[in-house]
Image: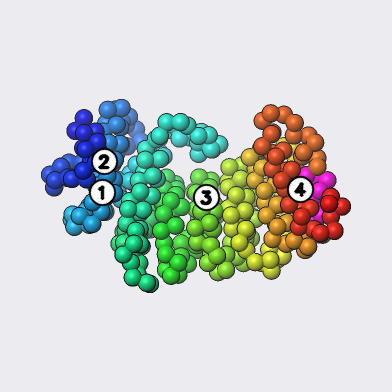
């Protein structure tokens, strides 16, 4: 009840005494072991404690910087929330990506990382060339935890570290090239991790980095990143396949034509196989979108693949009439339109 009251009052005032702060921080950092059930009351208490601390940051960000060890304790609390992924209730989501309406501790931790970074990312008073406090203070502290987590043998820690990167990569500034290079190389390394959940997280983070740090990541890492993503399209786990395709889409939308030409034959061979019946629906959908992106990047150079692609897409459109395949059919229609526009001699137009 005290944590709930603190969260409610802080949403409007942002005031928190030192003793209150210590109490709330301790509650927020409370966690559980794998063989111990956390009572529902403590779960709610932890959520309210996290909310109270985030309200402190959002309302009084500069004040909280003067509180000894506050940011480190809050980052630790948020990562502990994400480590709730160890609970068996996440198994279905990890394997299939099924979403639930109820917010879980993992979501609380992810959202909290974004909120705290955003609170320290105001550029209103920044001089030209200077860095936000998120880039200069917060992210270095976070990446100390990330580095430690990545070295742990338990997959949960590596998973959380990579998902934390995915959640905060947009706050790394474009002039922090050394940091961006380190992150990109780290993500590529863990794309081949022995645990499928870590591979999924790496693909997720690559896809997010491709959006948030474009065009730098494409300009610097296309020759390394594209082959790795294409290889991961054949992962033994469908969810990893799908996220590898999704990351390929995000990365390739801003890639140079010359780089795409190097891998076009290899990736098109895989994608034409992936869109056939028998492949999981989500993987088929992502594969169709990949074809559209390749066609858009290659334009006239897509001609060698035209005769194989169009009949395959027409087959998808013709045979995807079931209600659950409606999204796949729509993506195939969009894809065949992009293919037709990319190839000017197309008989479709």
Q: Position of residue 279 (x, y in %)?
A: 69, 39
The residue where tag 4 is placed is 336
Q: Residue furthest right?
A: 347
- Magenta span: predominant SS is helix
* Quadrant where the N terminus is found in the figure: top left
Q: Position of residue 114 (x, y in %)?
A: 38, 49
Dot 2 or dot 1, earlier in sequence: 2
Front one among 178 and 12: 12
Left or right placement of residue 129 versus residue 329 in this view: left
Dot 3 or dot 1, earlier in sequence: 1
Kindly report the distance in space between the C-alpha atoms of the residues bearing marks 2 and 1.
8 Å
Is residue 338 a member of the stretch shown in magenta? no
The residue where tag 2 is placed is 11
- The mark found on residue 332 in the picture is none
The image quadrant that residue 53 belongs to is top left
Neighbourhood count class around disc 3 (C-alpha, 10 Å): few under 14, some 14–19, many 20 upward: many
Report the number of discs: 4
Dot 1 or dot 4, earlier in sequence: 1
- The mark found on residue 59 in the picture is 1
Kindly state the secondary structure of the residue where label 2 is placed: loop
Kindly state the secondary structure of the residue where label 3 is placed: helix
Q: Position of residue 85 (x, y in %)?
A: 41, 39
Residue at 57 percent across and 68 percent down: it is: 219
The image quadrant that residue 21 belongs to is top left
The residue where tag 3 is placed is 204
Span highlighted in magenta in the image? 305-313
Front one among 278 and 72: 72
Is residue 312 a member of the stretch shown in magenta? yes
Kindly report the distance in space between the C-alpha atoms of the residues bearing marks 3 and 1.
31 Å
């Amino acid at each position: 009840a005290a944590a709930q009251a603190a969260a409610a009052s802080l949403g409007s005032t942002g005031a928190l005494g030192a003793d209150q702060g210590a109490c709330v921080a301790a509650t927020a950092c409370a966690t559980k072991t794998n063989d111990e059930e956390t009572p529902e009351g403590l779960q709610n208490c932890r959520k309210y404690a996290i909310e109270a601390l985030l309200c402190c940051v959002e309302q009084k960000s500069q004040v909280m910087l003067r509180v000894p060890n506050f940011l480190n304790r809050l980052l630790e609390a948020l990562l502990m929330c994400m480590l709730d992924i160890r609970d068996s209730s996440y198994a279905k989501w990890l394997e299939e990506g099924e979403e639930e309406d109820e917010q879980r501790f993992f979501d609380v931790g992810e959202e909290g990382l974004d909120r705290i970074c955003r609170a320290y990312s105001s550029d209103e008073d920044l001089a030209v060339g200077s860095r936000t406090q998120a880039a200069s203070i917060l992210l270095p502290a976070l990446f100390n935890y990330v580095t430690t987590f990545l070295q742990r043998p338990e997959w949960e820690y590596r998973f959380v570290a990579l998902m934390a990167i995915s959640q905060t990569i947009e706050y790394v500034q474009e002039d922090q090239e050394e940091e961006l290079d380190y992150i990109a190389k780290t993500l590529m390394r863990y794309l081949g991790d022995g645990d499928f959940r870590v591979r999924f997280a790496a693909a997720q983070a690559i896809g997010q980095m491709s959006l948030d740090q474009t065009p730098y990541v494409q300009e610097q890492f296309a020759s390394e990143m594209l082959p790795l993503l294409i290889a991961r399209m054949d992962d033994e786990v469908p969810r990893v396949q799908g996220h590898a395709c999704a990351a390929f889409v995000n990365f390739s939308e801003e890639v140079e034509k010359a780089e795409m030409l190097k891998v076009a034959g290899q990736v098109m061979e895989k994608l034409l196989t992936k869109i056939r019946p028998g492949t999981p629906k989500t993987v088929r959908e992502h594969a169709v979108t990949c074809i559209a992106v390749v066609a858009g990047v290659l334009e006239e150079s897509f001609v060698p693949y035209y005769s194989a692609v169009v009949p395959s897409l027409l087959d998808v459109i013709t045979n995807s009439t079931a209600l659950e395949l409606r999204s796949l059919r729509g993506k195939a229609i969009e894809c065949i339109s992009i293919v037709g526009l990319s190839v000017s001699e197309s008989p479709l137009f």
